[in-house]
Every structure is written in structure tokens, then in C-alpha cells.
Image (cartoon, rainbow, N blue to C red):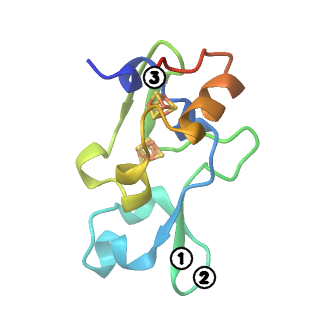
Amino acid sequence: MSACQSCGACCAHFRVDFSAFELQSEGGSVPDALAVVVNDSTCRMRGTDHMPARCSALTGRIGEKVACGIYEWRSSPCQEFEEGSEACHRARLRHGLTALAD
Ligand code: SF4
Ligand code: SF4
């Protein structure tokens, strides 16, 4: 099982911006209702520029059990985010979780 399923820290730490072409209404996969428009070319996952940040698609409790409600339809930055990366460590530490072992 991936550590991500008992984490979710990155989904509640970073601002998640992606190309407007990834919206369902533009022929992509991300449900429009879960995104906010930033400008003509960029959208943002709803909730990720609030303080504290938390993506609206995230369900469950950080550090216990979480899921992405749109996992198969998530945007490319979500797909590309690497478990165990420096950014992953930062998000985990921010939520009081230890960095993953290499
Ligand atoms: S912070 Fe790292 S371990 Fe946690 S959900 Fe994101 S990628 Fe997975
Ligand atoms: S869309 Fe899913 S993977 Fe991306 S930030 Fe939101 S909950 Fe995390």
C-alpha cells in the first residue's frame, strides 16, 4: 500500500495549479466544480489557496486515512507529484509527519 493512503499532506499544503485545458469543460478530466479559474490559461484546485490549504477533492483525515475523490481524473501536477520527493517531505513535516525513508 502506498504511504499516500495514510498521508494526504501534499493535498493540504501546496497550491495546485494546472492548465485550463485539463478541465472537463475543455475536453480534459478535472471536474469543473472542483476548480477555480485563475486566468485564461490556469485553474486551481478549489481549497488549495485557502489558509490552511486543503484540496476539495481530498477525503479523510490527514496522516490517518485519505483518498483523492477524483484520483483517475486528477490534474497533471497531481499525477506528477512524487512520493518521497523533497516537496513530499516538506508537506509531511508541515503536518507533523516524519519524512518517508528513502
Ligand atoms: S506528502 Fe508524500 S506521502 Fe503524503 S500523500 Fe503526498 S506524496 Fe504521498
Ligand atoms: S486532486 Fe486529488 S491528488 Fe490532487 S491535490 Fe486534490 S486530493 Fe490531492
64, 97: nearer the viewer = 97
The residue under label 2 is 39
Give how far apart the Cα atoms at labels 2 and 1 are: 5 Å
Q: Which mark is residue 102?
A: 3
Instruction: Look at the numbered disc 1 and give the secondary structure of its residue.
Output: strand
- Residue ID at (42%, 34%): 83
Q: Residues within 10 Å of mark 2 (few under 14, many from 20)?
A: few
Q: Where is residue 88 drawn, in percent x and y? A: 54, 35
Ligand 2 in which quarter:
top left
- The answer to whether marks 2 and 1 mark residues whose Cβ atoms lie closer than 8 Å is yes
Q: CA distance from mark 3 to mark 2?
A: 38 Å
Structural distance between the alpha carbons of marks 1 and 3: 33 Å
- Residues at marks 3 and 2 touching, judged by CB atoms closer than 8 Å: no
Three-letter code, disc 2: Asn
**Which secondary structure lies at badge 2?**
loop
The relative height of residue 99 versus residue 29 in the rendered view (above or below) is: above
Disc assigned to residue 42: 1
Question: Which residue is at a point 56% across and 30% down the rendered structure image?
Answer: 9
Instruction: Tell me the quarter of the picture where residue 89 sits.
Output: top right
- Give x and y (percent) for residue 28: 27, 72
The answer to the question of whether label 1 and label 3 lie on touching residues, with beta carbons closer than 8 A, is no
- Residue at left offset 53%, top offset 44%: 55
Q: Of the residues shown, which amino acid type is indicated by label 1?
A: Thr
